[in-house]
Image: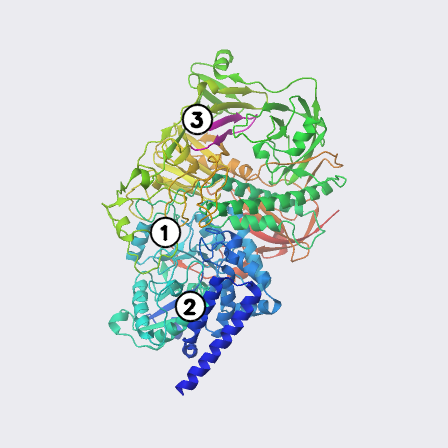
Amino acid sequence: QVKQQVKRRVKQQVAHQELLSTTMTKRTAPMRSFRQFMFQSVALALMFIPFDYATTITPAPNIEKNAINKDKGGDNENILNIHLVPHTHDDVGWLKTYDQYYYGHNNTITRSEVKIVLQTLLYSLPLNPERKFTYVEMAWLHRFYNDLSPHEQEKMKKLVSSGQLSFANGGYVMHDEATTHFIAMIDQTTLGHTFLKEVFDFVPRSGWQIDPFGHSATQASLLSRRAGFDSLYFGRIDYRDQKLRIDSRECEGVWKAGSDLYGGVFWGLTGSYDGNYGSPTGFDFENGDEPVDETNAVQRAEEFVRLAVEQGKRTKGNHVMTTMGSDFQYENAFLNFASLDILIATLQSHTFDPDMIHPYTSIRAFYSTPDIYTKSKADQVWTEKSDDFFPYADCPTCYWTGYFTSRPGLKRMDRFSSGFLQMSRQIESFDFKYEKTKLRSLDEASAIVQHHDGVSGTSKQHVAYDYAKLLSEGLHDAKDYVGDVLAEVLGGGGDKLEYCLNKNETLCDITQTATAANKTLYVVVYNALGQGRQDVVSVPVSADATYQITNLHTKTAMKSELFPNKNPSKIKGAAPFVLYFDSGEVPALGAVVYSIERDNTKSAVVEPVSFDKYARDNLRGTGNDIILHNGVMKIHLDRNTGLMSAISDKDNAISLKQKWGYYTSFDASVHGAGLTQETSSMPQQQHVLQSRRQLKHMSNRFSSTTPSKQNSGAYIFRPSEPSQVMSLLTPKKNNILIYKGDLVTEVHTQYSFVNQITRTMPGKKHIDIEYTVGPLPIDGDGVGKEAVLHYQSSVKNNDLFYTDSNGRDFMKRRRNYRPTWKHNETEPIAGNYYPVNTAIYIEDSHASLGILTDRSQGGSSLSSGSIELMVHRRTLGDDSEGVGEPLNETDGGMTPYPPYGDATRVGEGVIISGRHKIAIGQGNDGAAVCRQGMDGMFSPLYLFYSLSPLSKSSFSILKSKLPSNIMLVTFQRVYSKENTFLIRLAHQYGTNEHSELSKPVIVNMVSMFEPFRITSVIEKTLTGNQDLKEWEKSRVKWETSNSDKEGASDVHLSDSNENWSQIELNPLDVRTFEVVMSYME
């Protein structure tokens, strides 16, 4: 009988291997040596794994009907329920590019192949119907599914419908939470959710942010609760917070963050609640840990139970989730599942020593998913959390605050791409020629870059290049398509309109060529916001001449001025001049056409005046100040230095001085080892395998006396001294120039590696700071630099300041303080940096100061009255958090990675340009001061050009503009449904931020759109994948120590179509609607 069983088992494994090898050879030929080795290993493992064990596995209990229903005896608090959750974490770019990870290329860097992971899952899951697997990143699944044959696609659909293949998060990527804008977060999540709904009819109910380096209030409220999630799981929190939560059994709870209007979301730590997401120590079967088989099953089960019982002490209730997997795992899914099958069967059948499993009397283990686990936690009363999880630190000198700024060029490209995508979708609404969107490449590229190693700036250099390439390709596709549609809408006679993607470098071929040849240029200015707006726009031109700009809709001449382009970045081919003109009123979601004609009669360029001459001649100079006035705001310039000394408007005045400087980056090869200032110890980490960005030298890094060699790098910001005084740059006074025009006034200030333009425009309630920074010098001292723009004001904010959360809530920050634990700050600079996605402000009872940014940056208020923002970084040491190289971007690229090269950077450090807006207000008015400019920073006026006249001079999608505190976040066609659009409306002010604009607003959707007639409106969850009413009926209700169990009326519900004209938006609310409407010619 034994011989027959062995023969039968060998025959089964050979058959499985032949089927697998044949399939994989067809799909991946020619097979590389690593794949051959892997499959040979799989075959060998399968030969000795007794599949008979699979038949003894107990299915997962019906949590919904039994585990949380104690009245029916389905659960017993003396039973420890272990939810084993097999999963893989597949970065959409990090050490390798998107393509390289998918196909398994470039394995000299790391051996990872997502296609193999998904293929082996497809064939291993059906071998045991109790097996379950949770997948997360839809960028991979979408690509893999489209590569499958129809038969394999059906096989995958059956796995999903049976519950064996499940999905958490379900976004296109697992986005970052510090450096992402809420609109881009919504877009990438929607892209993934739409795929899951349309292909598998699957709706994710659990958030799964296991790897991002800190967690935002917006993720909890908007991207989890409002997206229809019942729970949100993640891996990384500050090591001190983690220790406190382990000790107090609060590794899970309810997170009601910021302006959450919907009752909060259940949150929990992964990775045995140890602050990561890997398998328990000793159970990472793909990375050398001993597999479980019939010879060691009892021993391994006892080892596992000890860890599970310890985990049970860290939370409430008798259910624990054990993550089984990590980065790019389950390439050998057969080996993983075979070991898990035997482990689960043994855990179910073995009688454990009572002392081993105390305080439990028995063990129940089963395959599970985050959705199943979430339902098991609904019978507890949880502690409520209201702040966020920033900044993240995993040791006293390891603050992950550098990535808030890392790769500022990519961060700006990402922000611009997101705004351009929203604008393009609006224009797309006029095009009914296609059955599929023509914006897919930009949609996908923008989604991919939201990955937590993408826009965060924490990938390898060649991967960052690839992210930029994807965005560039998507932008080019979108601009060409939108140019065609706009030309058709405006009657362009077949010629498409051109958009200049390099206008930020003063490069635009069509405008430079036209003005050089003295041709008439037609400019279409498009406004993607829901309110009409007026601004000063710029056009790169080639000739010094007088230009006549005419608004072809109103037939009026527009004010204009010509400025020289100083070209501090030395851009080859950049236009020598910039033409500014006043746009006049541009309608909401609409455009106006202008003509530009050149008059050769005379030079018109605004000539610079030296600061000293201006100080002598200008009548506005009084005392030590020179005053530049735009009709609303005044800039006071110190007569002796030429630098800003104060700003004021008719109601407010504050002293305000700017300083450019830098911190030197800690580099152990230069600075040796610095002593930590921590007196407490690190929490125990023995229960989790730190498979990704492993915590280095565990036994040493958390000692109060051990020197730390933690470098500043792509993730970590660490100055060379904990309380380092910023090294200041001195402006070159002789190079301070003032360009004074009637429309625009600029003050140009030059430092050693910084050029700044301070700009005012008529009627604007802000001051523009445009900067060019770089190359950051490293040759003199061989040390990296962290460049900072520091603002010092008279505002007495003491230790309080506010930073935005992904462009939504403003989070209250207090220097050297954390709301959750008693904080002993070990890095007074880095430890007080927070992500600034769009704005930071300080205030007192008399005045407020806000700074708006054009991309994500790290920022803080390190002393009363101050705001500082890190704008650029360049480090020469690797911070050992996994990326394996310094953050050293250069303009000449790099040599190949070993063994083909040595990854040497070529050329000089990169130069980046950017913009801040300075705004002031009355006392305790900081949020409102920032809110008034945030939408415009995200979505500027977009300029398209043509050399041919257009038959129409204007249009608008809206019948009337929206209220000033409402943003039309999304206006997007749904191609899978006829005449259907996805529309999102957002209230842009928080509670008590403004006496009027913080009030709820009623919007009439029926009369909103000009060329469309609405026939149906259904309110959806945030990503549009389920009706809001249905989600409300099925969602899990949570009870906290601060409140009773949630009721069923904490969301807006439209009872009938009659309410389309009465859509109410509360402060910071975002509501999503699926709208059917027809286009009226």
Residue 5 position, x and y percent, is 42, 84
**Quick one: label 3 or label 1, which is nearer the N terminus?**
1
The quarter of the rendered structure image containing the N terminus is: bottom left
Crowd tier of the residue under label 1, counting other residues whose Cα lies within 10 Å: few below 14, some 14–19, many 20 or above: many
Magenta segment's dominant SS is: strand
Q: Which mark is residue 336?
A: 2
- In the image, residue 56 above or below residue 982: below
**Quick one: label 3 or label 2, which is nearer the N terminus?**
2
Per the model, the C-alpha gap separating discs 1 and 2 is 28 Å
At 45% across and 80% down in the image, what residue appears? 9
Write down the quadrant of residue 26 in the picture. bottom right
Residue 83 position, x and y percent, is 39, 67
Crowd tier of the residue under label 3, counting other residues whose Cα lies within 10 Å: few below 14, some 14–19, many 20 or above: some
Query: Disc 2 marks which amino acid?
Result: Asn
**Quick one: label 1 or label 2, which is nearer the N terminus?**
1
Query: Disc 1 marks which amino acid?
Result: Ile
Query: Disc 3 marks which amino acid?
Result: Ser
Per the model, the C-alpha gap separating discs 3 and 1 is 39 Å
User: What span is in magenta?
Assistant: 754-776
Secondary structure beneath dot 1 equals loop
Would you say 362 lies left or right of 98 here? left
Front one among 238 and 54: 54
Residue linked to disc 1: 237
Would you say 831 lies left or right of 465 here? left
Residue linked to disc 3: 752
Front one among 998 and 659: 659
- Looking at this view, name the residue that lies furthest to the top: 616
Magenta stretch containing residue 716, yes or no? Answer: no
Per the model, the C-alpha gap separating discs 3 and 2 is 57 Å
Question: Do tag 3 and tag 2 residues touch (Cβ < 8 Å)?
Answer: no
Secondary structure beneath dot 2 equals helix
